[in-house]
Image: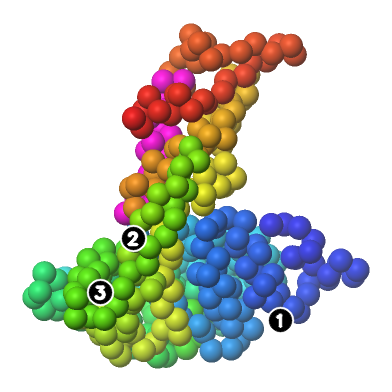
Amino acid sequence: MGEQRMNENSNTGELRPIEEITPPTIYKELNRGVLGQSTALRYVSVAIFKHTTGKVPGNILLIGNSGTGKTTIMNNIQRLYHDVPEYKSFRAMTIINANLLVDSERMEFQPSRLMAAVEQRARALTGDKPTPEALKAAMERATICIDEIDKMSSVVAGKPNAIGVVLQQGLLTLMEGEMVAHTTHVWVDGVEVQMVLSIDTRHMMFICGGAFETLYDQVYLRVANPSSGEKMKSQAIHTADGQVRIETRFSLTDFLKPEDLFEYGMVPQFMARFDNVVLLRDLDTPILKEILLKSVDSPFHRSKNFFEVLGINLEIDELAAALIAEAAEKNIRTGARALRTIFGKIINRLEFDPWSHQGIEELADGGHRLLITPDMVRRITG
């Protein structure tokens, strides 16, 4: 991402006004690391633009099955802040699990834990001897990513969950804008002193995410009820080997209503603080194949780097890649993570002893080539 088109004015070499880093530009950069979630990235790009230009932060709730990319999106926002010089002052971003923000014994929301995590990131910007003004400014521009927010619902197994209510009410207060008293050490006139900083949360951006696993079943049962008047769509599915089958699939995106989230256990006032509730799409075979072949963090590219150390060029047949993706798609609740599991079973034998494998091929330049074939995949996936 360190390309001049994103970072600097190509004519003067100076940093561009931050307003010139528009949502389409942000989207393009995020899309390099997040595949198959174009709709979600558009919402995220607008939220980042609002946040960095001083507009009202566009808080977002991400809902998606495990492996659809919630954490990947958060990590790529962090990468964006780090790689773009104009965003240096916004690099105090933290990703924290929701359950760490509540003291379950005292039944209290613990904003101090969140502020401590933000401060740690802020000090990477301000240096070892920050002034109170510098540390306060860095913390107040933070992006807060809270994972597994769905585990903190106000209802669990049909019973009230007090911890969930405490967390949602506490976050609601922060998202509305609150002055949080934060005790820390700063430097004044060359001397380190303990000081209580008043951190204004109004300009922080909050991105929460969760799988909301039982929400799918909850909404499906509502839609499947004959009295609902709603119908699921049938669609043609193209298999990896070229066949076509007709399937009726349930998509949460088509049927989710705000009332469903309230019934799940999300407090209405808390939900009102999100500009957008964004559903991540389940990853289908073409997208999973693209992730396998093109994502820099894909298991294939990791293995390819491993084999390069051995002087072996690892390649994969197009159909073999499609078969792996098709098998991963069947694990609808694990998404891209299933790619790693399935590919791992295939590649483990090759990594253990590639030289005795019948597919190893010596090249004219003295190197070697190893091709992952459809037959190798079928032996594992059946």
Q: Secondary structure at mark 1?
A: helix
The part of the image, by quadrant, that contains residue 156 is bottom left
Colour convention: rainbow
- Precedes in sequence: disc 1 or disc 3: 1
Residue position for label 2: 248
Residue at image location 38% in from the left, 74% down from the top: 254
Q: CA distance from mark 1 to mark 3?
A: 44 Å
Q: Secondary structure at mark 2?
A: strand
Label 1 crowd bin: few (<14), some (14–19), many (20+), radius 10 Å: few
Q: Which mark is residue 19?
A: 1
Residue at image location 39% in from the left, 44% down from the top: 328
Q: Is residue 296 above or below residue 376?
A: below
Q: Is residue 341 magenta?
A: yes
Q: CA distance from mark 3 to mark 2?
A: 13 Å
Residue flagged by tag 1: what amino acid is it? Answer: Glu
- Precedes in sequence: disc 1 or disc 2: 1
Residue at image location 65% in from the left, 11% down from the top: 362
Label 2 crowd bin: few (<14), some (14–19), many (20+), radius 10 Å: few
Extent of the magenta region? 333-350
Q: Which mark is residue 223?
A: 3
Task: Answer with left or right where residue 205 lies relative to residue 338.
Answer: right
**Residue 322 appears at what percent x and percent y?**
50, 39
Q: Is residue 55 above or below residue 75?
A: below
Residue flagged by tag 2: what amino acid is it? Answer: Thr
Q: Nearer the viewer, mark 3 or mark 2?
A: 2
